[in-house]
Image (cartoon, rainbow, N blue to C red):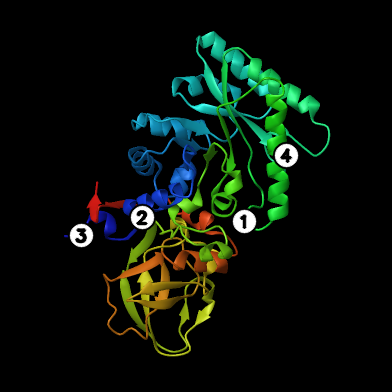
Amino acid sequence: MLDRRELRTWAEIDLDALEHNYRALRAMLPQGCRFAGLVKADAYGHGAVPVAQKLERLGADLLAVACVDEGEQLRRAGISMPILCLGQTHPALGEELLQWDIIQEVEDLDSARVFSEIAQKQGKKLKVHIKVDTGMGRLGFRWEDGDNQAVAQEMAQVCALPGLEVEGMFTHFAAADGDEAYTMTQFTRFLDARKALEERGIHLKIYHCGASSAVLHYPCTYLDMVRPGIVLYGYYTDEDSRGLDGPGLIPVMRLKSRIAAVRAMPAGAKVSYGCTAELKRPSRLAVLPIGYGDGLPRVLSNRMEVMISGKLCPIVGRICMDMCMADVTDLPEVKPGDVAEIYGPGLTEQTAQLADTISYELLCHVAPRIPRVYWENGQRIS
């Protein structure tokens, strides 16, 4: 009997594939190097709570989120392992960081002082990681080539603030998927920042800078911890990564839709909004109950392909809010109730290229109304 979640459109999340990717990536690390699993943005669209639960069972050392609410969600679900918030947190939410035991990044002395005051009033210690901007241009203490003594002094002041436990320091690479020279420039700046603190007698527990691309390409950047994101979910960060020995990543999500109807249409018939498609031959069109309201980019109208019965079938006409049409003329056996695969191995990357974007964006945009169906040990689970 079909699960009701699989009657329209759904995303299958393979937790065995997640485990495979975790173990493959972990095997690349030196002994003692920590593993921080990225579960921000609802675990890149895969479902933060089930993914976090799996990573906790597997023995990941830390989870990383983008905001306090994401951390709270995990704590309410019973996740007890360390959680690091990589994004800026407004001081008004400082008490929630303490309440939910979330480690917070600090990007400047002023915000660190505010968090220090909040923690002291609560009679608690707030764990923090200092963020250093070595060339990304976002948050962080700006560390450039040249004299950084004033910056180093401010970071040292953060480490001396009461109410804070400065556990680590980190940076984020801007071009580790294609610019080795710039990545190494950033890495050198980060090492200089670490040295500047050590010269002031400050030795932190965790230094980290390597996210997905650096994990694949730059083992020298592993330091005390790495932060795999998209690679954890089975996608490489660039085409060159596919040829690497190992890690043999497996996509964790397959987005599927059950064909609602198959319609015979005459040559010359126009299809969907704007009549942007006109059939050049008598055709059979499969109506798929998925559209831009489900996160399928409208820009892919008349461009993308989906997999039906093992064959790539082009989308015909504009993608609607809740539906789209695929040409199945060359598949006479296709009928209502059959399944079309929208994203999956090979498909997601191909579709991202057509949309002039990256797989990250497609996965994160799979809408909340699409149910996630989880598989583990080859069986569908609750």
- Hey, which quadrant is residue 4 in on the image? bottom left
The amino acid type found where label 2 is placed reads Ala
> Label 2, label 3: how many angstroms apart (C-alpha)?
23 Å
- Say few, some or many: other residues with alpha carbon within 10 Å of mark 4 (under 14 / 14 to 19 / 20 or more): many
Percent of width and height locating residue 326? 41, 75
Nearer the N terminus, badge 2 or badge 3? 3
The amino acid type found where label 3 is placed reads Leu
In the displayed image of the protein, which residue is found farthest to the left? Answer: 1
Percent of width and height locating residue 18? 38, 51
- Which residue corresponds to the image point at 35% horizontal and 41% vertical from the top-left? 58
> Label 3, label 4: how many angstroms apart (C-alpha)?
56 Å
In the rendered image, which residue does mark 3 sit on? Answer: 2
Number of numbered discs overlaid on the protein picture? 4
- Which residue corresponds to the image point at 48% horizontal and 50% vertical from the top-left? 28
Query: In the image, is residue 271 above or below residue 170?
Result: below
> Label 1, label 3: how many angstroms apart (C-alpha)?
42 Å
Percent of width and height locating residue 217? 58, 54
Nearer the N terminus, badge 4 or badge 1? 1
In the rendered image, which residue does mark 1 sit on? Answer: 177
- Assess whether mark 1 and mark 4 are in contact (beta carbons under 8 angstroms): no
- Which residue corresponds to the image point at 51% horizontal and 32% vertical from the top-left? 84
> Label 4, label 2: how many angstroms apart (C-alpha)?
36 Å
In the rendered image, which residue does mark 2 sit on? Answer: 17
Nearer the N terminus, badge 4 or badge 2? 2
In the rendered image, which residue does mark 4 sit on? Answer: 189
Nearer the N terminus, badge 3 or badge 4? 3
